[in-house]
Image (spheres, grey):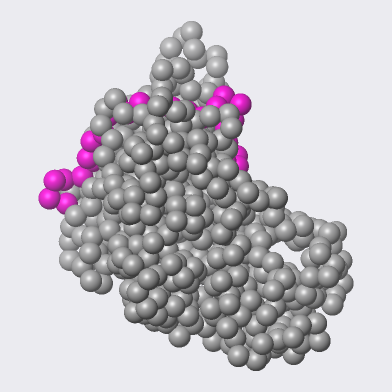
Amino acid sequence: MENDKLVILYGSETGTAIDAAEQIQEMAFERDIADCTVQSLNDFDVVQNLPHVKIAVFCVATTGDGVAPGNMRKAWQFLLRKSLHSGWLEGVQVAVFGLGDSSYDKYNAVARKLDARLQQLGAQRLIPRGLGDDQHPRGYFGAFIPWLEEFWKHVLPILSPYYQIRENPDSAQSALTRIDMMKNTILLEILPYSEPLSTVSSSSNFYDPPEDTIHPEGGLCRGTVTCNKSLTAEDWTQDVRHIEISLSDALFPFQPGSIAVIYPENDEKCVSNLIEYVSKTTDLPSRGNSVVKIISNAKEKVVIDDKRDLLSFPNPTRLHDLFKKYLDINGTPRRSFFSRISHYAKSSEERDKLVELSSPEGADLLYDYCIREKKTYVEILLDFPSVRLPLNTLLQLIPSQRPRLYSIASSYLMHPDKIHLCVAILETLTPYKRNRVGVCSEYLRSLTPGQDVLFWIKSGCIKCPALESNVILIGPGTGLAPLRAILQERQMVQNQMNNPSEREKHSAIIGKVGLYHGCRHEHKDYLYRDELHSYLSTGALQALHTAFSRDQSHKIYVQTRLEEQKAAVYHHLINEGFCIIAGSSKRMPSDVYETFLNILQSEGGMSVTEAEQMMKYLLRTKRYIVESW
C-alpha cells in the first residue's frame, strides 16, 4: 500500500456512494491509471496505510440523524482518536465528496466532519469538498460532475510522473477492464432440482447477525405471522399495518427501543420475469427450480459489494430463491450497471443508449429515466431486450438484498413470545405516474397468518431511563412504534406492583409519562387510539397530547402542543426529566429541537447560548434521545 498513488474510499448505506467511488475509478481506467483501488473505509487498513497514500478520495453518505454508514464507522471512530497527532497525515492529499439530502436537518454531516478531521490530522485538501444533494434537479450528479472536472484538473499533474496518462480518455477501455475482471471470476453449475435445499445453512453467511445484535448466539429468529391488519381507514391514502410475529420458543429478553432486522422477499412477478430472461441465455433443466451451484474461480473472495461476497448465499440453491430472497432485483441500478451491460447489447442503438446513460454527459438522462422513475434491474433488462447477460455475470451485477430495520412496537415483558411491528407501506408515484412500492413494506403487507419471517433483534438508539424517571415521549406517525413498547413495559411493571408477590422486584415509585402523538386526521390515521386511552385510564400514561395536522384550516403539529404546554415542559427539563423523540428524520427532529430551545429561553430566561448549552448537556447525558429514520 505504500506505493499507492490513488486510493478511493467510500462509506455507503444504499450503494450510491459506491457508485460514485467506482465512477472515479473508471475515469482513472480511462486515463490508463490502472492500479487505483476502491474499498470501503472499514475494509481499508486506515491505521497502517492511509499515511502512505499519495492521493486519497473519500465518497461518503450521511444516514439517518447525521450518522456515518456502517461500512465506515469503525474507521471513522479510529480517525476521531485524540491520540492521533496533527501531522499524522502530512503529505497526503485528500478530496471529499458527500452524498446527502438537503431536506434532512443534518445534511451531509458526515462529509463535512470527515473533511474537517482529515485537515486537522495534517492532510492537504486537494480541492474543496463536494456535497451531492438528492433534492437537486439532477440528484447528486448536479454537484458530482463539476466536482469531478475540478478533481481531474488537479490530480493529473500530480500523477503524470508515475503513469503514461491517456490524453483522450477511453470509456470503452474502462468498461472492458471491468468486464475482464468479472469474466472468469465465478463458474456456475446448473443442476435439476432433486431434493429440498436449506435456505439457512452453516456454509452461508448471508444471514450473519448485524452489529449490536441481541443474543446472536441464539441464532436467527424464525417467526410466524399471527396477525396482519390495517390501522388506518380504508379510504385513507397510506396503509399502516399492525403485524404480530410469534415464535414457538420464548424470545431472549430485549428492551423497549430494540429493532427488528427483517429479511424481505421480492415480488413473485418480478422473480418470474427475471427467470424468463435468464432462460434465454442459460439452459434451465427445471426453470426456477433449477439448482445453481456457485464455484469461485478467483484467488481471493468474490466481492460483489460491501455487504457480501458471492459465496455468502446458501450454496447450492434454487435459482428462484436467488432472485426471491438473496438479490436486490427490485433495486434501482447504479450508473455503472449501464456501462457494464452495454458490452452485451447486440443492438448498436441500445448499446449507444446504455453508454450514454453511463457517461457524465448522460447524467440528466440517467436521472430522469432511471433514478427519478425508480427503475428496477428487471425493468432495465426488459427495456433493453438485445442485452443477453450470462447468468454468472448477472449474479455479479445485482447487489445482495439488504435487510430492513423496524422499531419493535411491543414490550418483551408483555409479549415474551412475539414481537409487534407498526409498518407504514411505502408507496410513491413517479413523475411519469408509475406506482412504486417499498420492497420490504410490501413484503410485510403481503404476509398472511401462518407464513414465516426471518429476523434478528438488535439494540436501537433508545435506551429507556429508569422506571422512576419522568419521561416525555414524542412520536408522530409510526414514530409511535418504539414509544408503544415503552408504554407497554410501564403498564406491565405497574401490574406487577399491584401484585403483592411481584411488588418487591421494583422500586416503590414509577415516574410520570406524557405522550405527544401527531397524525393528519383523527378518524383516518390515529394509530392505536383505544390502546393509548386505556393507558390513561390505568395510569401507565399521565398525559396524552394529540396533534391532528389536517383536521382544521391551520396546521397543528407535535411542536405546537409542546409550545402550549411550555411551562410544564420547562419544569420537566430542569427537574431531571427525560425526552424521547421517534419518527421521520426529515424536519420533525430539528423542529422539535428548536421548540425546546425556544421553551428554555421563554420560560427559563436563558440566552440563546445558554439554551444551546443546556440542550447539548441533555444530549450528552442521554436525557434527550432521538431515534429517527
Inspect the magenta stretch and tell me whether residue 408 lies in it. no
Q: Position of residue 67 (x, y in %)?
A: 57, 58
Residue situated furthest top in the rendering: 501
Q: Foreground: 488 or 605?
A: 488
The part of the chain drawn in magenta is 207-236
Q: Quadrant of the C terminus?
A: bottom left
Q: Position of residue 254 (x, y in %)?
A: 52, 29
Residue at 16% x, 45% y: name it: 233
Does 505 appear above or below 405?
above
Task: Confirm whether residue 550 shows in the render.
Answer: yes
Q: Position of residue 286 (x, y in %)?
A: 34, 37
Q: Foreground: 199 or 445?
A: 199
Q: Foreground: 87 or 551?
A: 87
Task: Confirm whether residue 547 shows in the render.
Answer: no
Inspect the magenta stretch and tell me whether residue 225 lies in it. yes
Q: Position of residue 425 (x, y in %)?
A: 29, 49
Does 289 appear above or below 392?
above
Residue at 70% x, 50% y: name it: 299
